[in-house]
Amino acid sequence: MAKVPGGKGAPHVSRQSPPQPRLKLFRPVSWRGGVIASSVDEYVSHLLIELGRLRLEIADIEDHARPPNTRTVLSDLLQWLSDRPGKAYAELVNWKTLDFAQMRSRLEKDHTVKPRIELSAEITKMNNLSVRWHPGGWRDSELDWRRSDNHFSNLITHRKWRQPPDFHWFVGDEQPTFDSRPSNELMYIRGVGNLSPEPHEDYGPYASYNRDVVDSILICAVRSAYETLTRQLDYSFEVTLVNAFDFETRDEDDESDRWSMRYPIHRVVSWSIEDAVELSARRAQEAALEKDRRDRTKLENINTTYGFTLEVFVAALIRASSVKRTGPAPSGEHLNRNAAKELRNLGFKVHAGEVRDIRELIERYNLETLPEALRPEAPKEPPITPTNIVPFPQSSE
């Protein structure tokens, strides 16, 4: 009698779960901005090299699902790099749209002026990045349908301007369709809003690659492309940035790079698009607070850094200020050099520049430790002009 498979007496067959896909790890890359900024080509090249090393295709790290879940950042960046400057840029540099009378009046005052434009970046409701240009002053202008010169197509005539724009004709901000984009859109990248570079502790059982690192590289490439576009426009226009990228980074070591312990990777772990003016003010405030913290720490650690206490330093300053028996007491750099010599005579290694820095820190944070003669002079306040005095009328005699 044949045995029924899986029935009583049938040999036990162990059912194993399918093997989990091996996680392929992209190597992170540093965000570098400012003077040592990396170009968008460097970030894109890094991703393409990593794809080849891991034997992956671009489609393996993208998602062509319906918006707002589309993720085709790398493909769109490659398309933008190959197609730029594009039609929108051609419309921007069409000098026939300039208001020549307005430009002439500005050039008479300053021969270095250029046409003013604004550059904005936003994440649309479909999670796509849209970068557009507008005439300078657009952001502060208001809709004005009562203008007598209102033209249906010319958006310049639709608004009330605080200052006359440098363009007499502007068309843009059209509603996008399935095969067209706004005519003033200089960059369009799908899926940027879906990029999430926050580090993951666990990628889950079905992840095939470390998506957080890939997203970190992609957002670096997107920001670099945006800032590259801004620098290129600066050659021909006075560009006002309406929006700017803000990154949060953390330092990481790369086990495959022996130099990473000394030069860690500044990996992007969070990003946002902010109002450029507010972001600049916040960064300046944060930089000032950080400098204040470093300076206070430096003043507190004078004994550790140089070997002498604050009291010893002030005593050296007092002796240095009364070195000469005749003539005025030394001041400024002469006092710094004399104080440094006094401290070196006591066995401390310090030079005049370091004395100057310490004096400035004391004057800023611990002024009471200095004698009156060594304190900086308080700035003289301008005389108060009375505003409530009515002049007597002049006599007619």
Image (cartoon, rainbow, N blue to C red):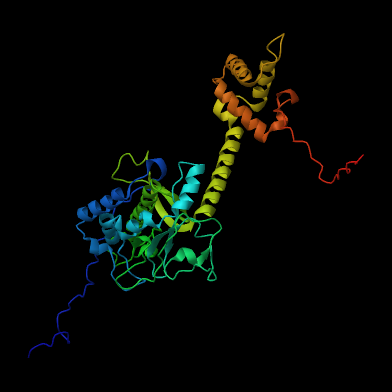
Q: Quadrant of the C terminus?
A: top right
Q: Residue furthest bottom?
A: 1
The one of 374 and 223 positioned closer to us in this rendering: 223
Left-right relation of 168 to 160: left
Does 370 sit left or right of 385 as displayed? Answer: left
> Horizontally, is 366 left or right of 196 in the view?
right
Residue 179 in percent (x, y) is at 29, 71
From the top left corner, tell me how far across and down residue 364 is, in percent: 65, 34
- Residue in view at x 17 percent, y 77 percent: 13
Residue 307 in view, yes or no: no
Residue sitting at x 14%, y 80%: 11
The quadrant of the picture occupied by the N terminus is: bottom left
Locate residue 319, reporting x and y percent. 68, 16
Name above or below for residue 358 compared with residue 169. Answer: above
Image: 205 above or below 11: above
Q: Which residue lies at the image location 56% right of the left edge and 25% below the top edge?
A: 354
Q: Nearer the viewer, residue 144 or 195?
A: 144
